[in-house]
Amino acid sequence: MLVRIGLLTEGGYPYVSGDARLWCDRLVRGLGGHEFDIYALSRSQRQEDEGWIELPPQVNRVRTAPLWTAEDDGVVYGRRARRRFAEAYGELAAALCGGPDTGNTSDGADPSTIEADRFGSALYGLAELARDEGGLVGALRSEAAVRALERACRAPGALAAAREARVSDLLSVAAHLERALRPLSLDWYEGDGLGSVDLCHAAAGGPAALPGLVARHFSGVPLLVTEYGVPLRAHYLASGADDGAPAVRSLLAAFHGGLASEIYRRAVLVTPGNTHTRRWQERCGADREKLRTVYPGMDASHFAEVGESPEAADPDTLIWVGRIEPAKDLVSLLHAFAEVRKEEPQARLRIVGAATGAESEAYLGHCRALAAQLFPDEAEDIHAVGDNPVSFEEIGGPEAPTLAEAYAAGAVVVLSSVVEGFPISLVEAMFCGRATVSTDVGAVVEIIGGTGLVVPPRNPRALAEACVALLRDPARRERLGAAARARALELFTVEQNVEAFRGIYLEVVSRCPVSEVVLDGAGEPLPFAVPAEAHVPGRWTHAGMRVVARGGPGWTTGHASAPVQATPVPAGEGAR
Amino acid sequence: MRELGELDRPGAPDSPGTWDEHVDELLMGAPETHVRDTDADPTRTRPAAPSTPAARRGTADPVKALMQRHRELCERAVDPLEIAAGLEAHGVTDRTAARFRHRDVFSLAEEMYARVSREADTAPRPTPSPAPRVRADWVLLSLLPGALCAATVAGLRLTGGRVRPAVAILGALAVALAVRAALGRGPLGPRSHPASPGTRPSGTPGSTRVWTCWLLAYALLGDDLLTAALTGVGPGGLPAAVRDLSTAPVLALTLACAPAAWCAHLFAAGARRKLTASRGLADFTAAVKPLLLGAFALFLCASAALVAISATILREPAAWTTTVTLGALLLLARLLTAHGFTHAPAVVLGAASATEATAPATAFASRLPGCSFLATPVDTVVAAWGPAAIPAAACSVAALILLLHATRTLTRASAHAIAGEPG
């Protein structure tokens, strides 16, 4: 069945410098049987200037909009529009401040549901205003917005932090909200835009999924959200770094939390990239039944040769591969290696990777100094030139020309991070069929699943013992390596990722067909205009086949002229 | 696929010290050196090393110790999820949380959030946002129009004959470019206001520019033109009127660019200060209104002084009212435009220009047969108060309207939203 998918991205595909563009590209190329409309929000002028990557033919159209700038369209609201704006924005502000409800809600409902409803209705109220009147950008910057925020902050029952807000805090919250709500003013929801696709797939949460929410509200398009990271968590980490006032931080946290839970509530399916993301989603109110973990896929072909020839490894070498930075805790690795050397004097450690940025460079220098201190250069006899048992290399150097060869050279691959998300190097090691020793951080346990050794983070002794155990036992190494490779090929290939999404697309579309209401010339709904056969899988109604039912027999359309599609569908819940 | 991992890569903790200490030190029990493995592991049975630091330092309340360690995070956090995110960025996982008798990091974070003492919650003093600074570039640029205009006037005085028109044209061009440059940056420039980050500064509308030029041209030769029109000088008299430019007002106005920039700077800096100090929007408006009026009054005084000086130097009669009101009108229009309110200045300047244009137009039209009644109102006004009364009235009424508008719009907090706000 041909599905028309609206792929929503933010600062990603199809821009050359986009996040996760590789994943999107593989997804779009892998699902040649479907059509893709790409709706991309760009993050900066530079990103726009760098251009797009090459797009496959199944991409029907690409629409882009800048998120980093917004042009005020100069619409000045009349009195009714002003009141609508003040109501919707006031509701949003009240939902953020946790103040009393200005509207009337039924008694006895769950307070968190009420809160989410208020947030959602305020959001859609603003979206409707933008659709009907335009001029939302100017309104979000106006004094009315700041005043509504102030009123919400001073309302009884507002958060303690919000009550402390000063004028400058209010202004920065208003500016942030204006920026975050820019997708509401886009012209993507009209006619044959997002309203006409079968399914919206947001490639990330947060701002990328906002157009999907609005399209769902206006036209009942089902929304599928894929998150490889949690935007809310990223927001917390970013806001922890800047030195904003508590009022600003708590209001913005409330906004991002509200947005995340609204997205999870409204999405038909949410596909986290790993269990860690999934836990956050559950925490933010995602229904367990909606969650399907879809692991990211990686290209296994580079590692096929290495993975099928485990004998290439040097039996005494430990390998560490990755980007060198403090979170990788190489210091702990070096201490662990000192312990290993006590047990296995022949052992060598190769650290393959590059440092980018001043902090990482400094860290690399520190590690080199520590290695030189811990391990003196040694030679085979008194005539040979000495060498250090720990070497620092970069991919592309003479020792490790490619990534696969770097993995191939070692018997055991070590991961010593204290903080990790979804460690790619571990998956690559698994593709290479290498036994691994990793620290128990991030998604490591989930990835390795019993095909390698896992030790607590920041525990060099445990790390050393695990390494020694593997170095001494080639048979076990081989067994673990083979199991790891089998597991990775099962779970982490591009094919499984693409296939999972193919299945999910069909499932979503079959569960929530977009019901198009077709009107006749007089504006009355036309019965039988979209026959049931239109939803049958397969493209069996193409031009070559003479099937009567496609448009319905002539008498069903009566004397009216060609049917026109009603936009917008009087929609929301009813359409689903 | 590399970038997928980076997406979820937690940020590095800011203090380097945390990297070198061990989370396990804080735990109650000695962390056993366990190796998790589905494969049977021979090393597992080995007893834990007896001298791990945590074995020596057990505390009765491990969560308290953890809170002590992440004190800054706990005190800053606005909700439990922020603590959870921070803990995870420091490598605390659900397995770690289990050792604090919690199901996961979230419930551990909730306990920490609930236990952190907030009575001593000293809200950090609002750090005043960086006030706009006095920079050499706009200070010098604001002096440039006056200097060029003075040079042009001197040139006009010293030269004669056929060189004179060339000097006048070149001078006018140079002054126009200098004014443009002076208004392009600094407190009068559009960049100092952007109502919101990431927005392109809205340019001055073309109509505002046209009306400004017209008003200046009228100040230069309007009165003489009007007198000529009313007294019925023949076509030969007009060039004489044009030749006899009244340069003093224009010199005063171009010199007034500098005080205008300074007044705008004082207003912007004061508003920025009030922005951080005010608790509410009403407070802010109340505090900024006197600031605006003060800056405006300061400019009036400064421009009056400049009118006196330039009239003395050029030995022309000092046209106080026309020049000062025109200066006030242009300053207010510029302030409003620079803060993003472009509509009102364009309309008001247009109205003032139209009024000024009507006077000589009716005077000339009255010469047509049967139309002599057209000149009556202008004639009456000029007879009573002189030809300067018409531009003075037009400009002062317009300036008054803009001043009222400015006290309503420029005293709003949203007009002073700080550029480059995170968001």
Image (cartoon, grey):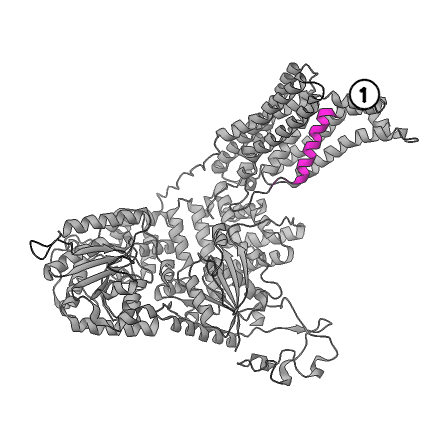
Quarter of the image where one finds residue B201: top right
Instruction: Note whether residue A399 is visible.
Output: yes
Q: Label 1, on which residue? A: B384
Residue A446 appears at what percent x and percent y? 30, 68
Residue A553 appears at what percent x and percent y? 68, 84
What amino acid is at disc 1?
A: Ala
A284 versus A528 height, above or below: above
Task: Please name whichever residue, B263 or A258, is drawn nearer the observer in this view of the structure.
Answer: B263
Q: Residues within 10 Å of mark 1 (few under 14, many from 20)?
A: few
Our reading of the magenta stretch's main secondary structure is helix
Task: Say which element carries label 1.
Answer: helix
Quarter of the image where one finds residue A351: bottom left
What residue range appears in magenta? B203-221
Quarter of the N terminus of chain B within the rendering: bottom left
Q: Chain of mark 1?
A: B
Task: Please name whichever residue, A324 or A53, is drawn nearer the observer in this view of the structure.
Answer: A53
Horizontal relation, residue A373 to residue A192: left or right: left
Q: Is residue A293 magenta?
A: no
Horizontal relation, residue B388 to residue A552: left or right: right
B267 versus A409 height, above or below: above
Residue A349 appears at what percent x and percent y? 19, 59
Horizontal relation, residue A363 to residue B140: left or right: left
- At x 76% / y 26%, what residue is drawn? B390
- At x 49% / y 47%, what residue is drawn? A173
Instruction: Note whether residue A286 is visible.
Output: no
Residue A164 appears at what percent x and percent y? 45, 43
